[in-house]
Amino acid sequence: MTKKAAIYLRVSSIDQNYERQEIELKALAKCLGYEIKYIFEEKRSAVLKMDTRDELTQMRKLTKNEIDRIFIWDITRLSRRAIDFITLINEFTDKGICLHFKDKNIITLDEDGKQDMFVSMYLYILGLFAQMDAENLKAKMRSGRERGLAIGHAYTGCAPYGYKLINKQLYIDEKEAETVRAIFNNYVDGKSIQHIIDILNSNKIPTRTGILWTRNSIYAIITNPVYKGKPELTSITKRDENKKPLEKITRVFKAPVIIESPIWDEAQVQRKKHKSFIDKSKEREALLRGILQCGNCGKAYCTAINGSGVPTYICSDNRANINQKLNCKNGGVACYFLDSICWQTIKDIYAYKNFQDTFTKEKAKNQQLLQENQTQINNFIDKQIELDKENERVNKGYRIGIYTDSEAIRAKGEINNNKARYEKMIEELKAQNSILTAKIKQDFSHYKIPTVELSYEEKKAVCKELIETAKIYSYPPNNRIVQLQLKMGLIFNIVLNPKRRLYYIIDNSTVTFNNPQSAPIFLREELKDKDFTVTCDNNDYFNEEIFGEYSFAQMWNIMDKYGYIQDYPKVKK
């Protein structure tokens, strides 16, 4: 009866001898009368725990009925951890499977399937020496690395994207560095990671390895301090009994600067915003999604359907799990009312003279952006054409039996999802182009909004462009204050009475919202009834007698007296 065998190889990118080892092991097995049934090509290092090595795990599932002998080049291929090495020897011995190490011609079982105790002792000693050799090698590598750092070598042996290694020193790769700068600039401007991925891939800008850009590759660039010239190297100095890190030391080195520190720092701020203020309810239209924050706890406001079936902005603390819940009591407000009021506020901005003066020189910039957007639209259209062709190939493959029903459905579903994503990108770019075109035709203000009714996507683009933050505060019993801060420094207070459906808007530089509720507890009594301060007795809103500090109710009555109270806008639900 033919004896059955397996071959276990340690495949290494720096060791090119494994093909020769496979040939010689096959020849040895054939010479001894074995038929090779399995070949395991392990890609993970032998210094790792045996449970973490995929091919070894598969090989350990073999039984005596499937295999008689396993051929291995040498003991270091099986494991460089003494305890794992002995465990594996005993495990295969108990199954009656012989291990044959070629380099020293060591065989764990004799022809009768019995274990030779002297061989076992010899293997135990060799296993200890293999572990000692691995530990000495790691110590030498650490020592060599520390010496290299001490004499000014680069902190890494693999240059990050945007750099190249020359004589163990980091230098800027200008072609890749341009892509790095574009990634940071887009991210700081508020573009999402998926948006950046689509732009890079549609323009066929390659990664270092030639594969497509992914979220991980973009995230790795955005979070790496090497680009501001301060790469960090973290070393583990102490581990627990389970080898988990207990203590770490982080050292900062120097590298050529690709991204200036303020831009890199702003990207980290933007990253935290994306992490903190993400809103999953994407299917509802909400102009202030991603912008509106809770003035009480600082969390994002998201959208939800209230008891009356009305889409409403609510504090996301209401949805937090028990470990993250702050029990925030800040109230909500109907999306369609607040969106409409904020939109009216933004539309009127162009009336301010400083906007007319500041943005008259934006025309050339907008024309360039318009052209770039159109190029992107054309690229995305080309991508959609490619997906249509791919869809036809799937249909053809299904008709001739290459695809099963489930495979065809899955493939077509992925194609349709990608097409929908590109279509959304195209619509967003068209929305931006509509605004850019209107700005280019205007002669006096960058922020003047066209008089034509804009689509939701167009309004959303304007809100993201103009608004820095919008914070909401509750005032008992049923009132709300939304403080709208624009990116150019202006702040507006939108004061709402949802129950009576009334509101007013006032410039914070004229009537300052003091927000006494956020003051320390020991100061709140002193600030009681001082919710607002009219800072100037010479303004365009009131007579000279309106000046100083006022309570919420007093300010509401003043605004009502001067005719600034308005009804909620009539909008479609």
Image (cartoon, rainbow, N blue to C red):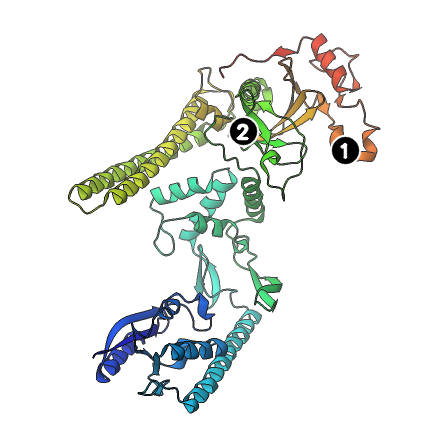
Q: Nearer the viewer, residue 329 or 419?
A: 329
In the image, taking residue 119 as reference, residue 552 lies left or right, namely right
Query: Mark 1 sits on what residue?
Result: 519
Query: Mark 2 sits on what residue?
Result: 303
The answer to whether the residues at label 2 and label 1 have Cβ atoms under 8 Å apart is no
Residue most extreme to the bottom:
118
Query: From mark 2 to mark 1, how far is it between C-alphas?
Result: 28 Å
In the image, taking residue 324 as reference, residue 97 lies left or right, namely left
User: Which image quadrant for residue 385?
Assistant: top left
Badge 2 element: strand
Q: Please report whichever mark, 2 or 1, sits nearer to the chain's N-terminal start.
A: 2
Residue at 28% x, 37% y is: 382
Amino acid residing under circle 2: Thr
Badge 1 element: loop
Please say whether residue 195 is visible from this viewpoint: yes
Where residue 352 sits in the image (x, y, percent)? 59, 19
Residue at 43% x, 79% y is: 90
In the image, taking residue 418 as reference, residue 277 lies left or right, namely right
